[in-house]
Image: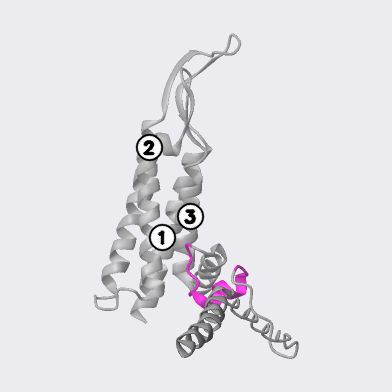
Amino acid sequence: MEDIAREKAQRAPSRAGSGAAKAAPARAPAARRAPAPAPIEEEDDSGDAVADPWSREARELESPRSPIDDPEVLLDDARSFLRELEGGDRIAFWGATLVVLSCFIPWKETAADGDFLGLISLGFISFLFAIATMVFVGLRARQVMTWVNPMLPWGAQMVCSVVTLVWSLVFLKLSSDTTLVPSPLGNSEMMNSSPSIGCFLGILGGVIAVLGGLMGLKRQQE
């Protein structure tokens, strides 16, 4: 009996110790350390500066310049084209240019409606053929149509120049009406219709264009 009582007495403290061990709170996990910040690299001032993507130089390097995007390219092409013109081609080109410019001033004056610009009258036909003359001069000067006979663009240029001159003369005849009618200003009389300075400039430009074309033919034969 004494042995049994002794064993019970030994078991009781051991159970109490195990219960106390279970009741003890668990340790909190150790806090993690934040990673050390990466070292900041200093900018190398000795290297080349980064190009500004919005600068004009950067855009020129990225994409080729075109006349549509850069008007300076168009002006450079125009200057080089005018420098390439020689002799009769230059005369014909400037003669046709004179016809084109004359269409922006009055070609006819009427007593009822006043002045009429060449662009809003029958002088527009001379304007179109003068533009065609300039185009054919450019084709010949730049030698664009090398696969055709050189006389073909010259012939087209001459036809356009002659039509420009002839139609300007026809317009001069059509716009001349010597019938006297009362003037809208004052008590005087004036012609019903008369050609204006633009028509005469168109005739002059047509003559110059035809002469330039004939000089161009002489150069073609040489």
| Quadrant of the image occupied by residue 35 | bottom right
Question: Of marks 2 and 3, which one's residue comes earlier in the chain?
Answer: 3
Residue 143 percent across, percent down from the top left: 36, 76
Local packing at callout 2 (Cα closer than 10 Å; few below 14, some 14-19, many 20+) is many
Q: Tell me, yes or no, if residue 204 can be seen here.
A: no
Query: Which residue is the site of mark 2?
Result: 171
Query: Which residue is the site of mark 1?
Result: 134
Residue at screen point 50% across, 63% down: 69
- Image quadrant holding the C terminus, namely bottom left
- Provide the secondary structure element on which disc 3 rests: helix
Pick the residue in front: 20 or 56: 20
- Image quadrant holding the N terminus, namely bottom left
Magenta-tinted stretch: 54-68
User: Which numbered disc, 2 or 3, marks the residue closer to the eye?
Assistant: 3
- Residue type of the residue flagged with mark 3: Thr
Kindly indicate whether the residue at mark 1 contacts the one at mark 3 (C-beta within 8 angstroms).
Answer: yes
Q: CA distance from mark 2 to mark 3?
A: 19 Å
- Provide the secondary structure element on which disc 2 rests: helix
- The answer to whether residue 216 is left or right of residue 63 is left
- The answer to whether residue 49 is left or right of residue 91 is right
Task: Identify whether 21 is placed above or below 163.
Answer: below
Task: Identify whether 23 is placed above or below 121.
Answer: below
Q: Is residue 56 magenta?
A: yes
Q: CA distance from mark 2 to mark 1?
A: 21 Å
Residue at screen point 68% across, 87% down: 48
Residue at screen point 74% across, 91% down: 46
Question: Of marks 2 and 1, which one's residue comes earlier in the chain?
Answer: 1
- Residue type of the residue flagged with mark 1: Met
Residue 158 percent across, percent down from the top left: 33, 61
Pick the residue in front: 94 or 178: 94
Query: Which residue is the site of mark 3?
Result: 97
Residue 221 percent across, percent down from the top left: 34, 79
